[in-house]
Amino acid sequence: MNNQLTLTREQLATNIAHVRSTIVEAARRTGRAPDEIKLIAVSKSKPVNLVQMAYNLGVTDFGENRVQEALPKIEAFHPQELHWHMIGHLQSNKAARVVGPFYCVHSVDSLHLAQLLNRHAGEQEKRLLVLLQVNVSGEASKEGMSPAETLELARQIVALPHLQVEGLMTIAPLVEDPERVRPVFRELRLLRDQLSAELPAYSWQHLSMGMTDDYTVAIEEGATIVRIGRAIFGERVNKLKEVENK
């Protein structure tokens, strides 16, 4: 069954409320203020009507993985208070297309990509918010700069005049027990703290880390942005079909 079409407003409201209450609980466990944590609803593969529904329920930030899928949604629905975030791997040949439509690019994983975004932002007379993606776990399947090279690359990227670096992002390995990825989130926080100490003139406020299966642990380790898809919108249709076919 296509849950994208059958998810009701009431179900979506329940899902969003549950995620928000879980964020509050995780923040309070570590003495943090819940309003320090931004919720991004990951709307990849979801139709724009679900985005509109979630927006009307108070969600103002949405994350997309693919430029070609996101742009029609952004064109169709872009109220002033809504922020679209590029959270997926960004190919160099699509860098020009994200500068205007997206509020922030979480997935700057190389100096080359940063230089392209800086050039296109300059041509559009904009200053683009970005996060540096770090492959903390070292998985070959994941994009991102290595922790060892992040400091030197960060020194060069923060100097680009049309980018505003706001912090770091990572994607943890997919595991059944979220406690196993706590060290990944902790390492990103420690790396952020190192950058804050060595490059204090720049903002390193954000840690974009944590998804549906591990966001409570990410918050306990300092996440300021969590990227939640399944817990809000339900399983992807192709994932449901995989389960049904087993």
Image: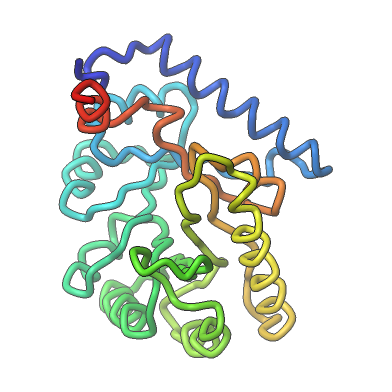
In this image, 139 relative to 29: left or right? left
Report which quarter residue 41 is drawn in. Answer: top left
The count of marks equals 0
What residue lies at 66% left-to-right and 84% top-to-bottom?
199
**Residue 94 at what x, y percent from top left?**
19, 67
Q: How is the image coloured?
A: rainbow
Q: Nearer the viewer, residue 106 or 133?
A: 133
What residue is shown at x 33% (from left), y 28% (from top)? 235
Is 119 on the left-hand or right-hand side of 9?
Answer: left
Closer to the camera in the image, 164 or 125: 164
Q: Residue 218: where, in percent of width, then height?
A: 62, 48
Q: In the rendered view, would you say 243 is above or below 210?
A: above
* Residue at image location 22% in from the left, 28% down from the top: 237
Residue 92 or residue 71, whichever sits in front: 92
**For residue 111, what is the image quadrant?**
bottom left
The residue furthest right is: 31
Is the N terminus in the top left, top right, bottom left or bottom right quadrant? top left
Query: The C terminus appears in which quarter of the rendering?
Result: top left
Residue drawn at x 51%, y 65% is 137
Q: Is residue 205 above or below residue 27?
A: below
Q: Judge left or right: residue 2 versus residue 168.
A: left
Question: To which quarter of the image does residue 196 belong?
Answer: bottom right
Please tell me which residue lies in front, 161 or 32: 32
Q: Is residue 120 left or right of residue 110?
A: left
The x and y percentages for residue 244 are: 23, 21
